[in-house]
Image (spheres, coloured by chain):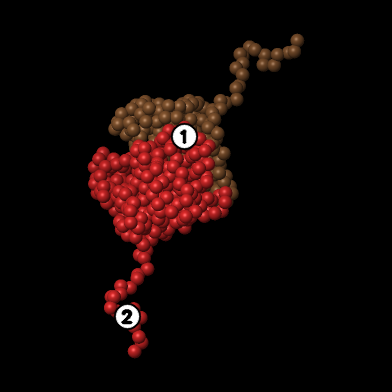
Chain colours: A brown, B red
Amino acid sequence: MPSPETDAPRGPIIPIGGAEAKTGTRDILTRVLALAGGPDARIAVIPTASELADTGDRYAKLFHDLGAAHVDVLEITEREHAHVPGAVETVERATGIFMTGGNQLRLSTILGGTPLAQAIRRQNAAGTVVAGTSAGAAVIPEHMIAAGATGPTPTTEKVTLAPGMGLTNRLVIDQHFRQRDRLGRLLTAVSYNPFATGVGIDEDTALVLGPDNVFEVIGSGTVTVVDPSELTYSSMDSARRNQPVSLIGLRVHVLAAGCTYDTEARTAAAPARVPYLDEDEDPVPDES
Amino acid sequence: MPSPETDAPRGPIIPIGGAEAKTGTRDILTRVLALAGGPDARIAVIPTASELADTGDRYAKLFHDLGAAHVDVLEITEREHAHVPGAVETVERATGIFMTGGNQLRLSTILGGTPLAQAIRRQNAAGTVVAGTSAGAAVIPEHMIAAGATGPTPTTEKVTLAPGMGLTNRLVIDQHFRQRDRLGRLLTAVSYNPFATGVGIDEDTALVLGPDNVFEVIGSGTVTVVDPSELTYSSMDSARRNQPVSLIGLRVHVLAAGCTYDTEARTAAAPARVPYLDEDEDPVPDES
């Protein structure tokens, strides 16, 4: 999706399911940093979702430890802070933007409609990677899961949707997915209007949505894809309050690291198969 | 907003607050018909929101009585009907599209993501007027008010949002506004993410949103505009469940017929003042 202003491709979008590894290989944060320019990166950390005072500094240290030259922490805790020119300029200068976890309604109520939110959208449209973990992942799409109940079954009131940051309208994103048993609320969200694809992202797992609208799964868990495009029946409009909803014809994929999903064609692909080799086996047998 | 394919301006969008006059001057339906081409109009009526069998035919008769040459009623009651090429062609041929009242979740769950919904979006982008009353108005924007509680005060759970048809993302639309005391749920919807403008449309009242994103109010009631762009504080992210939410800095306009509102500049304008003339007074006094 080229930006209307620059013709550059949109930047990658990386929603993370929360609790990404902060020691060891740190696959997810390493990928975020690489897409932001590696050692030359200038990362803007937005800890607005969190009410803990040290969340921003904690991520600054993580990115520094991974080799980032510059990390700016934007302390935005009131709507007026998101109108300050200096904050907007920090986002405009960044080569990568990272939103921490916390409460996604803090992100939408404090940033929604402000110059800072517009700058994040503009930067992503012009090519800058935007990543977010947990609440920071939930706020990425146009339709944000703001809250909801646990459990596997969709019911009429299981989810609260609110407008998110609108970086993509192809996905509705849930996080801490397997850990918090959130299939029911993702199905509920998708069934209200079966046009978007639902993705439930486990902890320490992420997807990297490229400018071609294909995403790759990274990390240690799975991404559950709920594709409603072939849905033939939904009782969402007629089910009684808090009663289960019938959904006929959903297509579901469970994707671990290396799998990809094309959000336009709505097709999943396994990673290229690497043949398993026994250590004693000769990988290239002689022709004989 | 020019269509990417045709460069033609987007067609008018007319959300109606329900219960529009069906006898007398019928200002609203007359305006819909005029924007669809007057006597040459070909109106496609989509009664999907309604569960009454005669809703479509009733509007067909209304438009015929007002002088429309052609009215097609699309009986779409299952998702598979919205994949039928003939139905899509009827929408593609139409010079005006009208969605009736009923339950907006029927519209989103039956049409969402189907070729018919895509055809409606494409037609509007290419210049065709799209109007909807009550549920048919609610489904027009990207963020649809699907359900909610009555009363004037915003509370954390007062509204259920769901993805709508996405013809505009500048407005969140409520209807039967004064008649059903819906200010609280509109404020709740707007406060989740203060980027869009909330409009509460009374019965027998409508707004005509032109391609320049300015709307004019028509009909016998008022449109209540809630502009959150100067909001300085919202407690939506911290208020307890079902407790009132504080919102500081909202701007509100109440607009009757003839008033206009610019959704980009966020400015309202009164109609040009027509001087009141006493019948016995000479409208052009002699200079003497």
Give the camera-side residue of B269 and A112: B269
In this image, B277 relative to A194: left or right?
A: left
Vertical arrangement, residue A28 with respect to residue B196, above or below: above
Give the camera-side residue of B272 and A95: B272
Q: Residue at x 32, y 60 (%)?
A: B256
Q: Position of residue B276 (x, y in %)?
A: 30, 73
Q: Quadrant of residue A149?
A: top left
In this image, B210 relative to B287: left or right?
A: right
Vertical arrangement, residue A238 with respect to residue B270, above or below: above
Task: Find residue B260 and name its label.
Answer: none
Q: Position of residue B277 (x, y in %)?
A: 30, 74
Rate crowding at label 1 as few (under 14), some (14 to 19) or many (20 or more) other CA atoms within 10 Å: many
Q: Residue at x 47, y 58 (%)?
A: B212
Sequence-wise, the earlier of marks 1 and 2 is 1
Report the residue marked by disc 1.
B81
The amino acid pointed to by label 2 is Asp
The amino acid pointed to by label 1 is His
Q: Quadrant of the C terminus of chain A?
A: top right
Task: Find residue B282 and name its label.
Answer: 2
Q: Residue at x 39, y 59 (%)?
A: B216
Q: Quadrant of the N terminus of chain A?
A: top right
Q: Position of residue B205 (x, y in %)?
A: 33, 54
